[in-house]
Image (tube, rainbow, N blue to C red):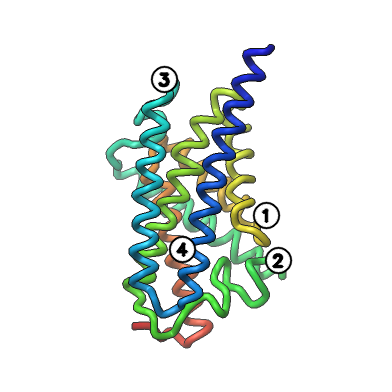
Amino acid sequence: MQWKGMRLLSLTLDAAGFLIFAFLIMICDEVIREWRSSAPVWLAASSAACAATAMLVRERIRRRADLSAAAVGWRDGRPVDIGWAVVTAVLVVAIVELWIGAGLPTTEKGAVGFVSPGWLAPDASLVFMFGAIAAHAISEELIFRSYLIPRCESELGTAGALIVTSLLFGLVHGGSWMMHSLSGLALGFCFVRTRGIAAPAFAHVLVNFWFIGRGYTLFFGGSGG
């Protein structure tokens, strides 16, 4: 029982460390986005955060005998991953669109999913914006799906790991935590089914692209550099 308690404590501390890391990424992301037209800077910062996340996950795997690159889904992509990614992306978009349609709380009043009215700049290059969004999505998938799901599974089982990581994913997204938790559950299921990071990461990128496009269309009539 004592050994079990120590393992749960280790898991809690491990998850807390990654949660703090995710919060720091989110805070830096918010600060840079306040500059609005600094999309190239945002892309550079998001790419650096993505690289740092990959290195951190790799280092944690190296230190743990119970994890491997295969366990966290670091493998070559397969054709079936594309299918799972598309299905998952459609499911997440449906969840968020239904959530918005029901008038439930989102990031802030008037937001389209996670995209708020003051969040985008009409003169920012969409190429840089999409690149930053893709890097940010991959960072989140490395943390919440690639590392935390396998890490939690040994102590909580697959169902428990999906629930816990989905709630943590929602937690870092603030006021829209429940909407993001449900989205995280879909992305987590995609990871469990494919046992690869490629499918949920691609799905996450597709979802982000969808709402960025929706945001530009709604707020600026489709304008963008």
Q: Are marks 2 and 1 in contact (CB under 8 Å)?
A: yes
Q: Earlier in the sequence, mark 4 or mark 2?
A: 2
Which residue carries the number 3 mark?
A: 65
Which residue carries the number 2 mark?
A: 105
| Badge 3 amino acid | Ala
**Residue 177: image location, x then y, percent:** 65, 55
Could you say whether the residue bearing mark 3 is in a helix, strand or loop? loop
Could you say whether the residue bearing mark 1 is in a helix, strand or loop? helix
Is residue 54 shown above or below 59? Answer: below
Q: Earlier in the sequence, mark 2 or mark 3?
A: 3
Q: Are marks 1 and 4 in contact (CB under 8 Å)?
A: no
Badge 1 density bin: few <14, some 14–19, many ≥20, Cα 10 Å = many
**Residue 77: image location, x then y, percent:** 30, 42
Find the distance from the CA under tag 1 to the CA under tag 4: 17 Å
Q: Earlier in the sequence, mark 2 or mark 1?
A: 2
Give residue 16's quadrant in the image. Answer: top right
